[in-house]
Amino acid sequence: MAVGERPSSCSSSQPALLGLGAALLSFCISTVLSQVPDPELLPTDPPKKPDPVTSETVVFWGLRLWQVIGIFSMFILAVIITLCCIFKCRIPRTKKEIEARHAQRVAAKDYANTLETVPPLNELTEIPGALPDTVSLSTVSEQVQARSASSSQLPVVREEEELTGPLTQPETG
């Protein structure tokens, strides 16, 4: 055999068989590989369930749930009380309470009117050891009313008249 000659045993069908074998081998490999499961798709453990929320569950800043609810409700209560004080909200009352309050006001008004008709204290009491006076002393308001009823203008009072006026009493010794 000379250099560059082909052996006689190699025929022209051999590369076609090699190509067919390669195609068959790749088909088998792809079929086998498609049956191997993907590790990402393999079943994993189910996710862990979160702990149930109880009153002792720490919510945030180390505060438990009941503490957060308590702080929040106190804040809401403070806001409501403040608004009621600012806007003078009335608390609903029963009919019985309203009627009792009305009766109390009427009684207070009647009592005030009764007090106006009571005579002055000096007329009602006797001073122990004092001589009974037949002439009662007139008050300043009675003198002013008597003067205004008699004349429309106020009288001019001189210094001498003021000293000897009806308000001064003679000294008894």
Image (spheres, rainbow, N blue to C red):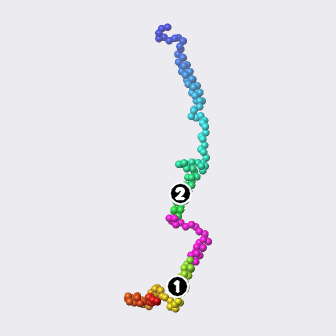
| Residue 92 belongs to magenta span | yes
Residue at 60 percent of width and 50 percent of height: 55
Q: Tell which of 1 and 46 is nearer to you.
A: 46
The label number, if any, that marks residue 122 in the structure image: 1
Residue 130 location, x and y as percent? 53, 87
Q: Do the residues labelled 1 and 2 touch (CB within 8 Å)?
A: no
Residue 60 location, x and y as percent? 54, 48
Work out which residue is located at the far top of the displayed protein and give it: 1
**Amino acid type for the residue under numbered disc 2:** Phe
The label number, if any, that marks residue 29 in the structure image: none
1 or 2: tag closer to the N-terminus? 2
Left-right relation of 145 to 158: right
Q: For marks 1 and 2, give the one nearer the viewer.
A: 1
Task: Give the extent of the magenta segment.
Answer: 85-107
Residue at 58 percent of width and 75 percent of height: 104
Residue at 52 percent of width and 66 percent of height: 88
Q: Is residue 17 above or below residue 171?
A: above
Mainly helix, strand or loop, the magenta region? helix
Q: Name the residue under label 2.
A: 75
Residue 48 location, x and y as percent? 60, 41
Question: Label 2's element?
Answer: helix
| Residue 118 belongs to magenta span | no
Mark 1: few/some/many CA within 10 Å (<14, 14-19, 20+): few
